[in-house]
Amino acid sequence: MPDHVYKQIELTGSSKTSIEDAIQTAINKAAKTIHNMRWFVVTEQRGYIDNNAIAYYQVTLKIGFTLDE
Amino acid sequence: MPDHVYKQIELTGSSKTSIEDAIQTAINKAAKTIHNMRWFVVTEQRGYIDNNAIAYYQVTLKIGFTLDE
Amino acid sequence: MPDHVYKQIELTGSSKTSIEDAIQTAINKAAKTIHNMRWFVVTEQRGYIDNNAIAYYQVTLKIGFTLDE
Amino acid sequence: MPDHVYKQIELTGSSKTSIEDAIQTAINKAAKTIHNMRWFVVTEQRGYIDNNAIAYYQVTLKIGFTLDE
Amino acid sequence: MPDHVYKQIELTGSSKTSIEDAIQTAINKAAKTIHNMRWFVVTEQRGYIDNNAIAYYQVTLKIGFTLDE
Amino acid sequence: MPDHVYKQIELTGSSKTSIEDAIQTAINKAAKTIHNMRWFVVTEQRGYIDNNAIAYYQVTLKIGFTLDE
Amino acid sequence: MPDHVYKQIELTGSSKTSIEDAIQTAINKAAKTIHNMRWFVVTEQRGYIDNNAIAYYQVTLKIGFTLDE
Amino acid sequence: MPDHVYKQIELTGSSKTSIEDAIQTAINKAAKTIHNMRWFVVTEQRGYIDNNAIAYYQVTLKIGFTLDE
Amino acid sequence: MPDHVYKQIELTGSSKTSIEDAIQTAINKAAKTIHNMRWFVVTEQRGYIDNNAIAYYQVTLKIGFTLDE
Amino acid sequence: MPDHVYKQIELTGSSKTSIEDAIQTAINKAAKTIHNMRWFVVTEQRGYIDNNAIAYYQVTLKIGFTLDE
Amino acid sequence: MPDHVYKQIELTGSSKTSIEDAIQTAINKAAKTIHNMRWFVVTEQRGYIDNNAIAYYQVTLKIGFTLDE
Amino acid sequence: MPDHVYKQIELTGSSKTSIEDAIQTAINKAAKTIHNMRWFVVTEQRGYIDNNAIAYYQVTLKIGFTLDE
């Protein structure tokens, strides 16, 4: 661990079902191009309202991953 | 969208089951007097503890709605 | 209530299933030594990622309890 | 309490005598149109200076009240 | 001034031309129902991008107005 | 002073009379178990409203005390 | 007012009696060299504890004054 | 919209003429490598001073764009 | 540059026309007594409203200048 | 790790030599009563000045440790 | 300088020896893929504790670099 | 101490060697015109990068000094 350098990127994932699922949605998309994701921290929780109901959640998170050879 | 003006109000909703349900509870109450709600952003997540268990969640959110004719 | 003095402590609970469960995990541990817990406020929501999936949530919360005789 | 939805409004009250009195002044004014006020939280403490003395305090607070039938 | 109580509301105005114009747009809309507006403070400056150009600015502001007879 | 290590705890004291008295109430309670308290810093000022009047103030403060032999 | 330019300085005043008095103490000291003070905003409220009692309050404030001919 | 994942990047654009132009300058540069930019939020407004005049503005913004196939 | 020490002062400038002009107004006033101003950062954007229109902008900025011989 | 609950405490350590040493000083003191310390995060860096030189650094940090059997 | 656009990335570097060395470690890693790095700003200072000693520092920083041809 | 009024000024010092040295550099410069400096608090830690190495640190600090006769 002391030799690792982490990079953080900031993504916003969406979900119609839950805050947790919106986080996983963002991680799924990031996984297509990033390896070695280690942790996330939530920076904002929003959502859209349609016809007086939560249409979907929008969760912004920073994802940390290792920059290693 | 560029012609819209949004007003934001701040509400706190409660729920015994989940954070998501507490958000919907606040929206349900607001729907009795406000139309055209579009989005929300969570500003605080609290809860009450009774007998060492989460009695209910209290989620504060800002709700944005259009001020249109 | 006006006679109460509250102390706040800051804990981090973990859970493989949900943010709500991570909060309850922290309260369960605190209950072994603290009585009269009344409320909590979430101060950080993090998590660990393993193999592109959320391995577990880590939720930090302040817990308030009464300092009474 | 778990069934309540709270709305928060933000007011600024003034007083020539004290910070506490400026808070009460804002509550007095709000009481003319709002029922069921439950709590407040101070968000800013300012004041005006005249002739090198505090002319009056200006305290901004959010007031929470229940939206119930 | 020491006798005034101010209420603050939070609005978001839009404009295709400038940040200043988005502020005025929000004030124009508020003026249809609110009298005695005295000041504003900008709390967020956003915008939408379309085809690599700023489509419109979205400026959120708190507007203070007097609650007087 | 350069040899001291301070610990900070966070308490909330209440008072029906003033913000200052709520601070002293928290210190009084802490004094039953803590020695060598040196300073405090206010982190939140709240209060409860009953029948349109301030029922009591709730002031949260961090208290620093020395951890010395 | 639209022609004025204000400068803000940050001072910390002390008092054994109250938060309000600590503010006035800072203004008194500033008045020896600064003219045209117009407003203040409180940025921190601390205090020192001696023998389990509030020895004195320390209130930090920004003071705005006009830079005019 | 609920299927989108957004990535945010943080850029600083400069302009000799206005804050709005500095924002557009950052978007212009980003457009050379990024598609589907949707929104921005201003996070800092700075500037350089030369010979007592504003030499140029430096506006930092987060730009959100869709990560879609 | 590594030998420079900068001092920052905080000013509020006003303008009837634009945010940018309010910044320049503050710099103009500071230029009467300060040399070697290098940069500014905006810390607050306010304004006064008169008859439902922006009467003037009030922009607070920190100005950095070199303390050199 | 998913089974751990962490508690955070806030300490201030001092040192005449460096910021790093002030952190270690706080950890040394905590080690007399706390086991299983895992991480820290710096929350404030202050210092005292005597005769125009840094007399000692004061670094405040939160220390996280596991609450395990 | 007025023609430059800067991009900021956020990295976390580690070091067993000092905060300064952790910053340099992050820059070293970034240098393998990024040119024209100009400045950094520290956003978080953490560390891991092993056997009551600082095992290594973890410093998070934003690094700004020019996006130029 | 209860009779003292402190003024705070904000300076940025630089150093090629360490964060601690950049703090001392700012204090050295301030000492040419200010007496009775008592404490500082770090508000920002930046630095410049040249050829992939830290060229110099830039540490911004508030310095408090007594305003006494």
Image (cartoon, coloured by chain):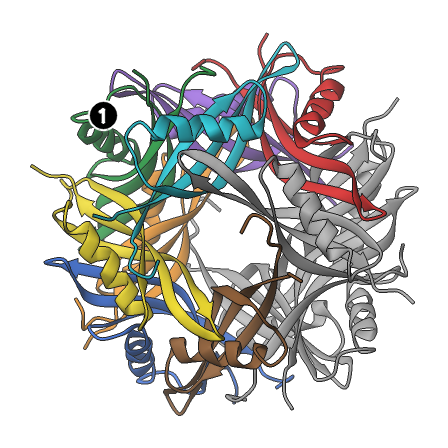
Chain colours: A cyan, B red, E purple, H green, I orange, J brown, K yellow, L blue
Amino acid type for the residue under numbered disc 1: Ile
Which residue is painted at 14% across and 57% down in the image? Answer: L52
Q: Nearer the viewer, residue E41 or A45?
A: A45
Q: Nearer the viewer, residue J37 or L53?
A: J37
The quadrant of the image that shows the N terminus of chain I is bottom left
Residue furthest left as drawn: K69
Q: Nearer the viewer, residue B53 or K42?
A: B53
Residue H13 picture location, percent across and down: 23, 38
Residue furthest front as drawn: J69
Q: Is residue A52 left or right of residue B32?
A: left
Q: Is residue I47 among what the camera can see?
A: no
Which residue is painted at 34% across and 84% down in the image? Answer: L31
Residue furthest top as drawn: B69
Chain where mark 1 sits? H
Q: Element type at marker 1?
A: loop
Which residue is painted at 23% across and 33% down in the image? Answer: H26
Q: Which residue is mark 1?
A: H34
Q: Where is I51 relative to I31, above or below?
A: above
Q: Is residue H10 among what the camera can see?
A: yes
Count of labels in the image: 1
The quadrant of the image that shows the C terminus of chain I is bottom left
Q: Where is E40 relative to E30, above or below?
A: below
For disc 1, the neighbor class at 10 Å (few under 14, some 14 to 19, many from 20) is few
Q: Nearer the viewer, residue B5 or A66?
A: A66
Residue L33 picture location, percent across and down: 34, 83
Q: Is residue L21 left or right of residue H33?
A: right
Residue I35 picture location, percent across and down: 23, 65
Q: Is residue K38 left or right of residue B6?
A: left
Residue K23 picture location, percent across and down: 27, 62
